Amino acid sequence: MPTFNMAVEHFIPHVGGKPVLDELQKSLGFSNLDMEASRMTLYRYGNTSSSSIWYGLAYVEAKGRVKKGNRVWQIAFGSGFKCSSIIWRAMKIVDFDDKNPWTEEIAWFLVSGNLVGCEPFPSYFEPSK
């Protein structure tokens, strides 16, 4: 098994749901910190399909974790055998600003400990009439 953390500093997989994240973490040997951005994206925004990798990137930026020279690996899955990934290198220290979707609430996402049981916010919809 390759040690992916030797190649990238931040890993942001597609938020396909809790079982997908659990299996990725187990099979690729990632820590809870490696999976934090995706799990918090699932918790806060739910499964937003391919856009979840951008919410995850915004999360690590808002946490002030992306430093100059860091590599960020975004990986997304689709139906069937579709998979796409990209590795970005930060050209400067990346911090959050007022356009970051986490700006207003990042302080509330002080994560420590086990994230495996993290579930998304419940959504309740009124049927249209």
Image: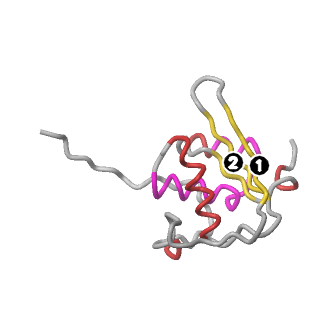
The kind of secondary structure the magenta stretch mainly shows is: helix
Provide residue 84's location: percent of width, then percent of height.
69, 36
Report the amino acid beneath label 2: Gln
| Distance (Cα) linking label 2 and label 1 | 6 Å
Report the amino acid beneath label 1: Ile
- In the picture, the disc for residue 87 is 1
Provide residue 112's location: percent of width, then percent of height.
62, 69
Q: Give the crowd class for mark 1: few <14, some 14-19, many >=20 residues within 10 Å.
A: some
- Image check: 8 left or right of 55? right
Residue appearing at x 54%, y 46% in the figure:
51
Q: Splitting the image into 4 quarters, where does residue 92 fall?
A: bottom right
**Considering only vertical position in the picture, is 121 above or below 50?**
below
Q: Splitting the image into 4 quarters, where does residue 36 fall?
A: bottom right
The magenta-colored residue range is 22-45
Dot placed on the residue nearer the N-terminal end, 2 or 1: 2
Q: Residue furthest bottom?
A: 107
- In the picture, the disc for residue 74 is 2
Q: Please state which of residues 77 and 54 is positioned toward the viewer in this rendering.
A: 54
- Image check: 23 left or right of 93? left
**Considering only vertical position in the picture, is 102 above or below 25?**
below
Q: Please state which of residues 54 and 37 is positioned toward the viewer in this rendering.
A: 54
Residue appearing at x 55%, y 55% in the figure:
55
The answer to whether the residue labelled 2 contacts the one labelled 1, judged by CB atoms less than 8 Å apart, is yes
